[in-house]
Image (tube, rainbow, N blue to C red):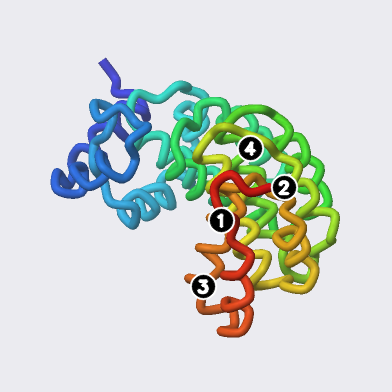
Amino acid sequence: MEKTISGEIEEELFRLQDLKYRELQMRTIPSVDAETLIGVRTPELRKYAKELIKREDISDFLNELPHRYFDMNQIHAFLLSEMKDYDRCMTEVKRFLPYVDNWATCDQMSPKIFRKHKTQLLQEIRKWIRSGETYTIRFGVGMLMEHFLGDDFDPEYPEWVAKIRSGEYYVNMMIAWYFATALAKQYETVLPFIEEKRLEQWTHNKTIQKAVESYRITPEQKEYLRTLKRKAGSE
């Protein structure tokens, strides 16, 4: 019986398996079922994905969802990151997002082609952050952080993120990451979100913690941010 491309990929991933790394992953990605972890290091996965993207039958793998292993989801994310056609890439990203169930796959999926289609991407980001789905929201905020905190920044964008309310740790951590990065890149515009307590208390304090740890924040800014920490029970 002829081996499918998914079968080939699975066989190669087990050949690349690193059991010590798998043990580390079991601790750092607790939301993933340990039985689905093969344990392939990220550089190996990226390298393999760059080889696979050239194959004519790669669509067979992309169409086969859900995948059996976490590492296959990682390969999927890295394949999407390598796609050069925006419309095809966006179609595949939207099809894959419902199957993303952990921070690693979410955060490591970053299509390069998105940089050339910012206007269209922004429309999708607005939908993602309103989706109510943990990792779809996280992905949307991540894309807003990656592509819209520089020359394409608009003060409206942090407003979108500040309005998100979630009981999910991985959503709130990304919001904190977004605002800490925004403070590093757009300090004067973003600071009022902290001063006016626009974020939930946990996210507010986590933002300050991450900002204070950043080398891109000046010592004077860090000193001031520390005075804005909120105590339990405070308004």
Q: Quarter of the image holding residue 146?
A: bottom right
Q: Mark 2 and mark 3: span between their CA atoms?
A: 20 Å
Q: Which mark is residue 161?
A: 2
Q: Residue at x 52, y 31 (%)?
A: 59
Q: Which numbered disc, 2 or 4, marks the residue that appears first in the sequence?
A: 4
For numbered disc 2, what is the local secondary structure?
helix
Q: Which three-letter amino acid code belongs to the residue tagged 4?
A: Ile
Q: Amino acid at mark 1?
A: Asn
- Does residue 16 appear anywhere in the picture? no
Number of labelled discs? 4
Q: Going by the image, does 115 lie left or right of 189?
A: left
Tell us which disc is closer to us: 2 or 1.
Answer: 1
Distance from disc 2 to disc 1, alpha carbons, whole Å, reads 16 Å
Residue 34: x and y in percent read: 25, 30
Dots 2, 3 in contact, CB < 8 A: no
Q: Does residue 40 appear to the left or right of 52 in the view shown?
A: left
Q: CA distance from mark 1 to mark 3?
A: 14 Å
Question: What is the number of the mark on residue 137?
Answer: 4
Give the alpha-carbon distance from disc 4 to disc 1, as whole Å: 20 Å
* x 67%, y 38%: residue: 88
* Of callouts 2 and 1, the N-terminal one: 2
- Dot in front, 1 or 3: 1
Q: Looking at this rendering, what residue extends furthest in the top direction?
A: 1
Residue where numbered disc 3 is placed: 214
Residue type for callout 3: Ser
Nearest the camera: 192 or 80? 192
How packed is label 2: few (under 14 Cα within 10 Å), some, or many (20 or more)? many
| Disc on res. 205 | 1
Residue 215 position, x and y percent, is 51, 78
Provide the secondary structure element on which disc 4 rests. helix
Q: Is disc 3 in contact with disc 4, using a CB cutoff of under 8 Å? A: no
The image shows residue 58 at horizontal and vertical percentages of 47, 35
